Every structure is written in structure tokens, then in C-alpha cells.
């Protein structure tokens, strides 16, 4: 069949970003090419997220607009992938007449076949299984050879699929299934291939990444550890950190119970491992943390942060917070504000609680009024903004290492990249700067969103 120009629109987390890359590789392997933009595409795929009601509304709105655009573009093919497909299944297809296909994360490998079939007969295809699980039939190294060379200096690799934690508010265990840790040898092979394709920074992904290798079925095939590590995540970090060409290594998202002394030691001892951790706290109130089934107290969270900071001075910590969880009082909220003030996060993502069907919390009354959720949301965002600007302003005058990604979207004369602490940096590039270069940037100005500066020279290790 005629090759298509495709465009993939991604909502949700970094897992979805990675799945979108895999989808693009599958399509390339079938002979299709990325479109310059959505308007010129023959096929648009929406990668959906179910984590909050608003995320689902956005994806549905986007899919409806695309289907309506068929009036002007009658040959436009539209498909959905991602968590909403697993969660809503047939109901999603019924809500969106004319959708060509819907494929759950587990069945992403069926994308080429579903697309061919949809083109042949015009009927909607639904590819899901009754229970969610890790992806089937995806052979990453083969897919990766299809990836464009020097695609992006920063790449994601899944190491742990699914989630067994069952936090009371969270839809993820039901849409992504039980935990499955990939064998270390597969992760290593995928990393080597990504480095050969031009990646310099690797982010290891898992819903609760520190549970890597903690499942009974996990068969560790690690070589002996030179550093004496015994836990699976530090072992994996140690093996990856040795790979030539790898400048930076990250993993996300964290959980306080996984911040063991050994992990702290690994973060300190392995040079590519960056001084940043995303460690969602969700609440500062012990009563709410218990209702959320998070498995730690506010004091336990603080201890985890202290351990990491003691091992890695200057470590940046970012977090997620939910406001307006069922029964959250003004006092509970004050406890969250107090925790944020004394931990001093580098950045925080604040979400209004959204009941998700079938989760334990959905059985509790959603009793914090919307206006109060909004007020708490704004109060935390204001407090965090003040904090972020103060942290970022401390860097004015300092030289920071930035991994150059490419020209910034708003102003092509400026390049964008990230520091090891995961802050966005915008800088005037020296002549000949290429994506993937490590550049010393002298910080001249800071906002809550970014650091601004000029290149002070290449980093010693890239000479
Ligand atoms: N309502 C609001 N926020 C949620 N999150 C997860 N589930 C919900 C929900 N039901 C937030 C958490 C998580 C982030 C990815 O999304 O803060 O860390
Ligand atoms: Fe959204 Fe969670 Fe699915 Fe990621 S795993 S896309 S955050 S529902």
C-alpha cells in the first residue's frame, strides 16, 4: 500500500513518550515517514493518558477534532494508542465513530497489522486484552535499528512495566498491569543501541522505578559488582554507567521506600548518574498518606531526602503533590505546605485530586469543593514558584553543564538543553554547537521555568 506521512500526538508520562517513539519506529519499518506537521499528515495517532479525568478529556477532544477534520481531509486516518484504550476499550471506539484503530500499550506491536487492516476495509480495529500486562512481541534492538541516527541526545528506556503499589487514587495498576522487570541484558543491549544512534543521556523508566528487580519472577543475570552493590537498581546503574559514550544516566519515578543507603551510595559513586531525583510526596499529612496507601509518613519521606542529600550534596529533588484528596482538611493541607517549605523542592507538579473509576479512593466521597481544590492548588503553586525562583537565582554567575538539545522553539538563535539537575537552560550557542554536546553555560538570568546564559566553553569531558 501507498506509504503514509504520520504524526503522533502524545499525552501523559514519559512511558507514553517512549511508546510514541516505538510506534514511530514500527511505522518507519513499514515504509511510512513522519509528516512535517499534523496538518500535512495522512495518519494521526493520539497516545492517550488516563491518570486524571482532565487528561482523558483532552485526548477525547483531540480525537474528536481530528475525526471532524475528515470533512476537509476525507482520507485522513486516525488512531488511538495508550492507557485510555486499555481502560475504556470498546466504549472508546463507540464514543468516537470513524476511529480507524485503538491499541492498548500491551499490544503496540500490532500497530502495523491494525493499520493495514483498517486501510483495507475501513472498519475500526480494537486491540486490547482482558487484563493489562507488559508489552508483547516488542523486540527493542530490532526496532532501534530503525530509529533515525542522532534522533535525540536524550533517550528513554523502560526497565519496569506496570505497578504493584496500588496507591488508592491511582489508575495505573489497572491500565498497565502487574510489575514486570526487564532482564538486565535486554536493557544493556537497548542502551548500547541507543548510544550507537547518538544518545548521550539515558533515562530509565518505571512507574515506581526503585522496585526494579524486586519481583519474585526476576532472574538477575548481573556480572559480579565491582562496587559491592547487591540491590538490583544499583547493580543495573553500575553496569550502564560503564558504557562508553554515556554521559548521563537518570531514573524515574522514585519512592521513599526505595531510597536505600545502597542507592544513595550508587548515586554518589557513579559519575554519569545525575544529581536529580523525582520523588513524588503526594501529601505532607500522615492521615492523608495513610488513606492514599503510600506506605510512608511525612517523617519517613524527610529521612529519605536527607539520606540522598547527605550522599549527594546539591542533589535536586522534584515532586508531585495531590491537593483535595477525599477528606483533606485545612490542617492536612497546612502539613503539605509545611513539608514543601522545609524540604525545599527544586520543582513541584501540583494536581487537583480526580477520582478514577475502580480505584479504592473512588469509593470515598470526593468532598473537597472544586473552589477549595483550586485555592489549595494555587497556594502550593505560588509557594513552589517562589522557591523555584530562589533556587534558580542562586545559580546566577555559576557555570553549569548543559546537554545541548537543539534550537529553542520560541527563539531559534537560542539553544535549549538541561542541566544535570534537570533544569531547562537556554543559551547563546558557540559556533558549531551540535545536539548532544555538553556545554558549560554561565547563568546570567533565572526564571521559575528556566536558566538563561551564554556558553562559557565545552565541558572538559567532551574535549
Ligand atoms: N488525581 C490527581 N492526581 C493524580 N495523580 C495520579 N493519580 C491522580 C489522581 N487520581 C498524580 C500523582 C502522580 C502524578 C503522575 O499524577 O501526583 O505522581
Ligand atoms: Fe498516564 Fe499513567 Fe498511563 Fe503514563 S502510565 S500515560 S501517567 S495513565
Image (cartoon, grey):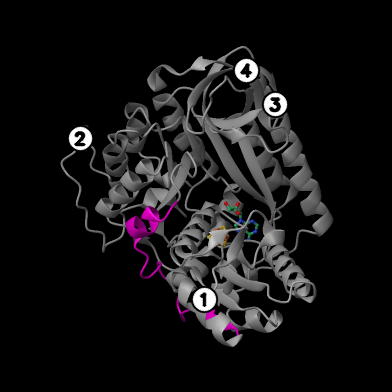
Is 461 magenta? The answer is no
* First-in-chain label (3 vs 1): 1
Q: Mark 2 highlights which residue?
A: 228
Q: Is residue 14 visible?
A: yes
Q: Residues within 10 Å of mark 4 (few under 14, many from 20)?
A: many
Quarter of the C terminus within the rendering: top left
Based on the picture, tell me whether residue 134 belongs to the magenta stretch: yes
Query: What secondary structure predominates along the stretch shown in magenta?
Result: loop
Horizontal arrangement in the rendering, residue 389 relative to residue 231 (left or right): right
Determine the CA span between mark 3 and mark 1: 54 Å
Q: Marks 4 and 3, Cα distance to the nearest angstrom?
A: 19 Å
Q: How many C-alpha atoms fall within 10 Å of the one at disc 3: few (<14), some, or many (≥20)?
A: some
Q: Is mark 3 within 8 Å of ligand 1?
A: no
Label for residue 393? none
Q: What's the distance in space between the residues labelled 3 and 2, CA to CA?
A: 40 Å
Residue marked by disc 4: 454
Mark 1 vs mark 4: which is more N-terminal?
1
- Vertical order, 68 against 423 (above or below): below
- Give the image location of residue 92, x and y in percent: 64, 78
User: Residue placed at 32% from the left, 27% from the top?
Assistant: 269
What is the span of residues highlighted in magenta in the rendered image?
Answer: 123-147
Residue position marked by numbered label 1 in the rendering = 1
Name the residue beneath numbered marker 3.
389
Mark nearer the viewer, 1 or 4: 1
Q: Earlier in the sequence, mark 2 or mark 4?
A: 2
- Which one is in front, 298 or 385? 385
Amino acid at each position: 500500500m501507498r506509504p503514509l506521512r504520520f504524526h503522533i500526538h502524545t499525552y501523559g508520562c514519559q512511558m507514553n513518550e517512549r511508546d510514541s517513539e516505538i510506534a514511530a519506529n514500527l511505522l518507519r519499518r513499514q515504509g511510512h515517514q513522519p509528516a512535517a506537521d499534523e496538518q500535512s499528515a495522512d495518519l494521526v495517532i493520539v497516545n492517550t493518558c488516563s491518570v486524571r479525568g482532565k487528561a482523558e478529556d483532552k485526548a477525547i477532544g483531540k480525537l474528536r477534532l481530528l475525526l471532524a477534520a475528515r470533512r476537509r481531509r476525507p482520507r485522513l486516518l486516525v488512531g488511538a494508542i495508550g492507557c485510555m484504550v486499555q481502560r475504556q476499550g470498546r466504549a472508546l471506539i463507540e464514543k468516537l465513530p470513524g476511529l480507524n484503530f485503538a491499541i492498548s500499550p500491551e499490544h503496540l506491536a500490532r500497530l502495523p497489522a491494525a493499520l493495514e487492516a483498517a486501510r483495507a476495509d475501513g472498519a475500526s480495529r480494537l486491540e486490547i486484552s482482558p487484563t493489562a500486562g507488559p508489552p508483547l512481541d516488542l523486540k527493542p534492538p530490532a526496532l532501534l535499528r530503525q530509529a533515525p541516527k542522532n534522533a535525540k541526545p536524550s533517550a528513554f528506556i523502560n526497565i519496569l512495566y506496570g505497578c504493584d503499589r496500588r496507591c488508592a487514587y491511582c489508575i495505573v495498576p489497572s491500565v498497565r498491569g502487574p510489575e514486570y522487570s526487564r532482564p538486565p541484558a535486554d536493557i544493556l543491549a537497548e542502551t548500547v543501541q541507543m548510544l550507537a544512534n547518538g544518545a548521550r543521556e539515558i533515562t530509565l523508566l518505571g512507574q515506581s522505578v526503585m522496585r526494579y528487580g524486586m519481583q519474585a519472577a526476576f532472574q538477575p543475570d548481573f556480572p559480579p559488582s565491582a562496587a559491592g552493590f547487591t540491590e538490583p537498581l544499583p547493580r543495573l546503574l553500575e553496569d550502564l554507567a560503564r558504557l562508553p559514550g554515556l554521559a548521563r544516566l537518570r531514573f524515574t519515578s522514585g519512592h521513599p521506600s526505595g531510597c536505600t543507603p545502597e542507592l544513595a551510595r550508587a548515586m554518589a559513586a557513579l559519575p554519569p548518574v545525575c544529581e536529580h531525583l523525582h520523588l513524588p510526596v503526594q501529601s505532607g499529612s500522615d492521615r492523608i498518606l495513610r488513606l492514599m496507601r503510600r506506605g510512608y509518613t511525612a517523617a519517613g519521606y524527610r529521612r529519605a531526602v536527607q539520606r540522598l542529600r547527605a550522599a549527594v550534596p546539591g542533589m535536586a529533588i522534584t515532586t508531585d503533590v495531590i491537593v483535595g484528596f477525599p477528606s483533606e482538611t485545612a490542617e492536612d493541607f497546612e502539613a503539605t505546605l509545611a513539608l514543601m517549605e522545609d524540604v525545599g523542592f527544586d520543582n513541584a507538579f501540583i494536581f487537583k485530586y480526580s477520582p478514577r473509576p475502580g480505584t479504592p479512593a473512588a469509593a470515598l466521597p470526593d468532598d473537597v469543593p472544586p473552589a477549595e481544590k483550586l485555592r489549595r492548588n494555587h497556594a502550593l503553586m505560588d509557594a513552589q514558584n517562589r522557591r523555584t525562583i530562589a533556587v534558580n537565582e542562586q545559580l546566577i554567575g555559576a557555570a553549569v553543564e548543559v546537554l545541548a538539545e537543539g534550537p529553542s522553539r520560541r527563539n531559534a538563535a537560542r539553544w535549549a538543553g538541561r542541566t544535570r539537575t534537570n533544569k531547562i537552560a537556554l543559551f547563546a550557542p558557540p559556533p558549531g554547537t551540535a545536539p548532544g554536546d555538553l556545554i558549560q553555560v554561565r547563568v546570567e538570568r533565572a526564571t521559575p521555568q528556566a536558566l538563561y546564559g551564554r556558553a562559557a566553553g565545552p565541558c572538559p569531558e567532551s574535549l
